[in-house]
Each structure stands twice: as C-alpha cells, then as structure tokens.
Amino acid sequence: MIIQRPQLEQSELTKYIPPKGEYETFRDVEHYKVKLKEWGLSSAREAKKEFWYKDRNYQRMVTIKGYETYGNALDINTLVIEFQDGNLTCIHPAYLKEMQQSSFGKESLLTFDEKETTAPELVALDESEPITAEVISEPAEKPAKKEAAKAPKAKEPKPKKEKAPKLEHPVDKVHFTASVKQFALVYNPFNEENDEVVVLENVQVVQEENPLEIGLAWCSHSKTLKKFELVIGDSLEFDGKVAAKKLGKGKEVSEEFLVDVPVLYKINNPSKIVKK
C-alpha cells in the first residue's frame, strides 16, 4: 500500500505556470533577506527557507528560487517558486503571503437558519396595485359613525438613473493631450505602502477627425515623469494606452493627496512625453 504524505508534492494535482524565460536570482543570503522583507514574507534574522503553497484540497512545501520584474520602473515582482518534484511556477508575492495564513481557503460558515428567518406568512406585494386595509372596530360604550377606510396611494416607482454609456476606448497605443490636475497617493496592498500618481484632466485621444474625450485619468508618477518636474496646470502630449481602471485612495494621507472625484481610467506606458 502506498502512503502519500499531505505535505509532499503530487504533480498531477498542481497546475504549473512556469517562468517565460530567464528570471532574477538572489545574489546572496542578505539579498534574499532584503527581498523577503520587501514582499512581506519574512522579517526575522533567520530568513525563512520554506513556504506553504495551498489549494482548496491540499498544501505543499515550496522554496523561492527567484523572481521576475516588470512595470515601467521594473519595481513589480512575480515570484518563481519550486516544488519538491522540481517543477517551477510563478506566483504573486501577496498571494503567497496569504497562503501562509491558517484561514486561507476556508469557506464562510454560514447556516441556513439565517436564510430562513423570514416568516412564511409574509408575502411580497405588488406596488403597482393599491393596497386596501380592512378596519376592525372594537365595541365602544357609545355608538360612533363608521368611517370608510381610505386606501393609501400606490407608491410610484422611482425613475431609474440611466448609467453613462461605457467609453469605447482604443486598445492600441495612441497619442494624448492632457493637463496636470493634481498629485495623489494610492495605497498598494502588495508592498503595503502608498504609491505616487499623477491625476490628469482634459484628457483627449488625438484622432484625424474628432478627438475622443476621456476626461479624467491617472498614471504612475514614474521616474520618467519625475524628470519633467511637473506642476499643477502643466500641459502634456504623449503616447500611451488607456485602460478602464479606477483610481484608489491613499492610506492615512493628507487631503491634498486625495482625489474628491472618481477617476475611472488609467494611462499605461506613457512615452514620447512633451511638456508645454
């Protein structure tokens, strides 16, 4: 009889996402400790060597072999981890961090009792028809005039707010004009810090015929943008891509770094920037 230990790898149960090519490895133990602390995986003097990789039905011990970098500033990482059978897969640091928690993967313990608290005799009423109330009078010492029960007026349904039509933004890289509205801070849960961003207004996609109005958008305050020493009101031209991604809020920041209106679009990979 074959006995399988739950902490050992069973390759047929795991879906691997191997790295696409070469990836960064650790220069030495100190470099490994610094990166673990940056990812929030370990801050102890003795750097943790093994981590749990969990799924709904099993958990495995893995080691971190290296990492991939991406993003405009090459400051975003994806970990490359190795299973006990030698297979490699990629995973985000924050996701691996969640897997170390004992509560990871457990379903919410909801009972049916909470769903059955509604009394069976209560029936939903159609608001489109008037509701009549039957009045039962109790016997009194002196006869009183009976008043007909007045039916309450039917509630008129509130008009539904029409949603703004979804912007059909271009997928490919295009040319933009915009101006700097303000600078803001956005909380990044992956490194547990606030990231600097630039909020743009009057954003337009330059086209041969009519320009496409984007309105408000935001982008990372990257090293490239910082070279231009932007101030509020600066006009810009640049190439880039636009994506539907709402701007979040900073954590414990002053009001000057908070945006008081929703910003629904993000500019990715701005290049060929011209400051006017």
Image (spheres, helix red, strand yellow):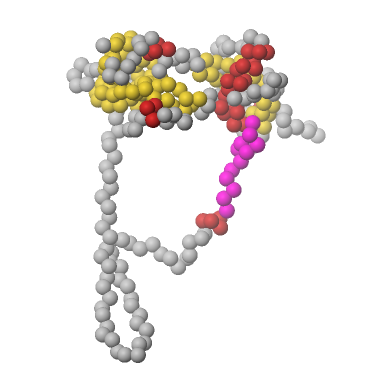
Quadrant placement of the C terminus: top left
Q: Is residue 206 left or right of residue 98?
A: left
111 in relation to 44, above or below: below
Quarter of the figure with residue 266 = top left
Magenta region: 100-111
Q: What residue is shown at x 51% (from left), y 56% (from top)?
A: 115
Majority SS type along the magenta span: loop
Q: Position of residue 97 (x, y in %)?
A: 60, 28
Q: What residue is shown at x 61% (from left), y 36% (from top)?
A: 104
Q: Is residue 198 left or right of residue 109?
A: left
Quarter of the figure with residue 113 = bottom right
Quadrant placement of the N terminus: top right
Q: What residue is shown at x 27% (from left), y 83% (from top)?
A: 146
Q: Is residue 255 left or right of residue 112?
A: left
Can residue 193 be seen here? The reply is yes
Which residue is situated farthest in the left direction here? 209
Q: What residue is shown at x 20% (from left), y 16% (from top)?
A: 208
Tell whether position 139 is magenta: no
Quarter of the figure with residue 102 = top right
Q: Is residue 66 left or right of residue 121?
A: right
Observer-nearest of 256 and 240: 256
Tell whether position 109 is magenta: yes
Q: Position of residue 174 (x, y in %)?
A: 30, 16
Observer-nearest of 90 and 189: 189
Q: Position of residue 264 (x, y in %)?
A: 35, 30
